[in-house]
């Protein structure tokens, strides 16, 4: 199961990133931050969603939006960058909690990563490849704060690719919307 | 000879760092992150611990990109003594000041022991130098010295593409090094607690030498054990004297 979460209010990391990049040639008009959670195991998605809905482990409904498929939080003006740790953190406490709550099935891994969404005005023409070296992957000579070359792998994603990643769960989307 | 103590929003150890300099009669000036003054007149720089910019995105990365740190990269400043403690070390790693090329060669990551994130570590431990003559801050120390120090961080695991030429490693009270917990409490590569740049004028140290200047600050258990073993423990005042020296 893959889902995104994001703060309903502006994320302060995104604010700092906007300020850092404001003086660069490809300064975006807006940056949004999402956390991508991948829960792996022999488990029913509806059961997992029910636990997610009834616990604050991944989403506090007052503060966060849960995104399982196409959503107003995502749009075609955004360029997405998926920042993944090369060696993912083993979120064993999350795994243990989910397995305790599940009546059937078993969760083996919970992996979280960041997705940063850059929004540009329609007239601004910039490629994801240019942004990777100028604004995403940190080096001593740029202002990019998102990915560290020693520990992260960064992949650009289009709006369609992002929805494709989430789309496998469109059948449970209705339940998720009730959270927002 | 004046040392600039660079303060960022979220720094919280600047007064302890200043206290260390004051006790050792090293002149200092606190310089805030939004200062427009030139750093050229200063003879050295100290980046204190804390949580600059709330550790947003990655610890130290936002401060590492600010204009004050850009000034440290200028030819007029980059060969002066620069000491980064805790969050200051993270800022140095993220800025590229520890790297010799055009890539970031160093990273200070989450504390991870046996593949599990272990969160924040707050404890006392011991460090011992390796190749101390190469770094201006370590040159007064000798191989085999054991220095008690307070460890206080959630992200202190050094990662690097090339092992450092000089620095400090975690050890036990007898000087035996190990990469395993609890001697190395955070999973740091090669048990590294502090590392030098290639030139030897910069030291990035994750535990807190400014809190470990005198034996009276050590926990009673360490004082008693050292007395029982008739062991000489070295304090960190020698490290700050590096501001008065030059790289070898």
Image: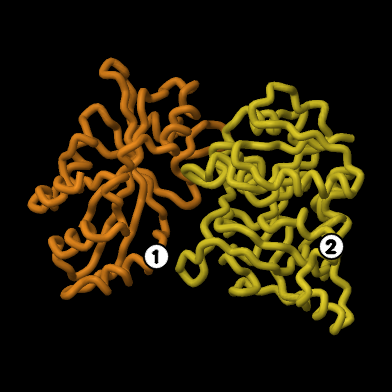
Label 2: element kind:
loop
Q: Quadrant of the N terminus of chain B?
A: top right
Q: Report the chain holding disc 1.
A: A
Q: Nearer the viewer, residue B86 or A89?
A: B86
Give a yes or no on whether discs 2 and 1 share a subunit: no
Up the image or down, A64 lies above or below B75; here it is below
Identity of the residue furthest to the bottom in this view:
B228
> Label for residue B235?
2
Q: Tell me where residue A19 appears, x and y as whole percent.
A: 48, 27
Which residue carries the number 1 mark?
A: A90
Spatial CA span between label 2 and label 1: 37 Å
Q: Is residue B199 visible?
A: no
Q: Which color is chain B depicted in?
A: yellow
Q: Tell me where residue B39 appears, x and y as whole percent.
A: 76, 28
Identity of the residue furthest to the front in this view:
A62
Up the image or down, A10 lies above or below A177; here it is above
Task: Chain letter for orange, please.
Answer: A
Label 1: element kind:
loop
Residue at the (27%, 68%) spot, across then down: A98
Q: Is residue A83 visible?
A: yes
Within the image, what quadrant is residue B35 found in? top right
Within the image, what quadrant is residue A112 found in? bottom left
Q: Tell me where residue B98 appears, x and y as whole percent.
A: 66, 45
Q: Nearer the viewer, residue B221 or A153?
A: B221
How crowded pointer 2 is (Cα within 10 Å; few <14, some 14-19, many 20+) is rated as many
Count of residue discs? 2
Q: Nearer the viewer, residue A139 or B181?
A: B181
Residue at the (69%, 29%) spot, across then down: B71
């Amino acid at each position: 199961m893959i889902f995104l979460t994001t703060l309903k209010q502006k994320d302060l990391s995104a604010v700092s990133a906007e300020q850092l990049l404001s003086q660069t040639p490809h300064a975006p008009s807006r940056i949004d931050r999402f956390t991508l959670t991948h829960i792996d195991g022999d488990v029913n998605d509806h059961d997992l969603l029910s636990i997610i809905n009834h616990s604050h482990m991944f989403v506090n409904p007052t503060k966060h939006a849960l995104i399982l498929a196409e959503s107003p939080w995502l749009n075609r003006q955004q360029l997405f960058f998926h920042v993944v740790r090369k060696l993912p953190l083993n979120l064993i406490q999350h795994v243990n909690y989910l397995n305790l709550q599940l009546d059937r099935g078993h969760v083996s891994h919970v992996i979280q990563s960041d997705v940063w969404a850059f929004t540009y005005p329609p007239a601004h023409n910039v490629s994801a490849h240019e942004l990777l070296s100028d604004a995403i992957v940190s080096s001593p000579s740029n202002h990019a704060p998102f990915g560290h070359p020693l520990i992260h792998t960064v992949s650009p994603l289009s709006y369609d690719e992002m929805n494709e990643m989430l789309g496998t769960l469109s059948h449970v989307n209705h339940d998720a919307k009730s959270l927002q | 000879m004046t040392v600039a103590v660079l303060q960022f929003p979220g720094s919280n150890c600047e007064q302890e760092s200043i206290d260390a300099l004051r006790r050792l009669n090293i002149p200092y000036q606190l310089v805030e992150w939004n200062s427009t003054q030139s750093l050229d007149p200063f003879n050295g720089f100290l980046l204190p611990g804390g949580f600059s910019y709330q550790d947003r995105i990655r610890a130290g990365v936002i401060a590492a990109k600010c204009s004050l740190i850009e000034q440290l990269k200028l030819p007029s400043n980059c060969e002066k003594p620069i000491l980064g403690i805790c969050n200051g070390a993270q800022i140095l790693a993220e800025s590229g000041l520890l790297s010799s090329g055009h890539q970031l060669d160093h990273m200070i990551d989450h504390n991870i022991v046996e593949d599990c994130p272990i969160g924040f570590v707050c404890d006392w431990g011991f460090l011992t130098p390796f190749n101390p003559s190469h770094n201006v801050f370590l040159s007064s120390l000798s191989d085999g010295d054991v220095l008690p120090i307070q460890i206080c961080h959630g992200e202190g695991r050094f990662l690097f593409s090339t092992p450092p030429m000089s620095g400090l490693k975690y050890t036990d009270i007898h000087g035996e090094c190990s990469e395993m917990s609890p001697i190395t409490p955070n999973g740091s590569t090669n048990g590294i607690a502090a590392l030098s740049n290639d030139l030897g004028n910069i030291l990035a140290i994750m535990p807190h030498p400014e809190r470990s200047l005198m034996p009276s600050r050590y926990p009673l258990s360490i004082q008693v054990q050292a007395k029982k073993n008739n062991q000489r423990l070295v304090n960190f005042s020698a490290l700050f004297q590096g501001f008065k020296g030059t790289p070898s």
